[in-house]
Image (cartoon, grey):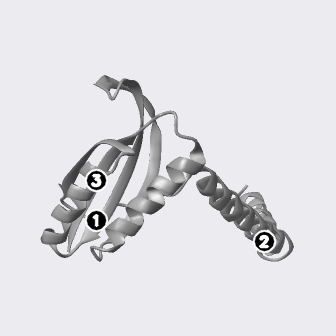
Amino acid sequence: MRFYETIYIVNPNFENDKINKCQEEIESELSKTKAKIINHRIWNKKRLAYSIDKQKYGTYILLQFECVKIDTLSDFDTWMKLNNQVLRHMTTTLSSRPDIYVEEEQKEEIKNSVDSDNKSTIKDDSELNEEGPNKKNGEENKEVEDEQISEEKEKK
């Protein structure tokens, strides 16, 4: 398996619905090559280095996938060139499998759910320690201190 990354630029004036349709269309064309999509996400609107089709800005979209056959990749590349929605694109080979991208909002939700789970288990553990072992340790420490005091009195 080889891993690839395609960065393509679409018109910055497209609304979210049109960008999503463009992404779905590209995904369906890529699925014809029997490739598996790993990540497909919108980066951002950025200023272009030079004007393309009278556009100074473009919406960058990152597509990462794995493909078995290199021959089918050239067909996908040709299709991308002919696609009117795509201003420019570039495909590169990756040396290793890319990490799966998780949106920041999803990361926060996962973090919050993990934190709340950890807080509840920490409370449970602390309650157990206060009731059980800590009381015993406190009593044992008191007995040890009493023994040390009595030994010091005997030495005097």
Image position of 47 (left or right of 19):
left
Q: Where is residue 87 in the image (x, y as percent from the top left)?
A: 33, 39
Where residue 144 sits, quadrant-wise, is: bottom right
Give the residue at mark 3. 80
Q: Earlier in the sequence, mark 1 or mark 3?
A: 3
In the picture as drawn, the residue positioned furthest to the left comes out as 71
Q: Which quadrant of the rendered structure holds the N terminus? A: bottom left
Three-letter code, disc 1: Arg
Three-letter code, disc 3: Met
Q: Where is residue 10 in the image (x, y as percent from the top left)?
A: 40, 41
Give the residue at mark 2. 129
Q: Earlier in the sequence, mark 1 or mark 2?
A: 1
Residue drawn at x 64%, y 57% is 111
Residue drawn at x 53%, y 54% is 20
Q: Position of residue 27 (x, y in %)?
A: 40, 64
Rounded to the nearest angstrom, the CA distance separating label 2 from label 3 is 63 Å
| Structural crowding at the residue carrying mark 3, measured as other residues with C-alpha within 10 Å and reported as few (<14), some (14–19) or many (≥20) | some
Q: What element carries label 2?
A: helix
- Say which mark, if any, is on residue 97: 1
**Camera-side residue of 3 and 48:** 48
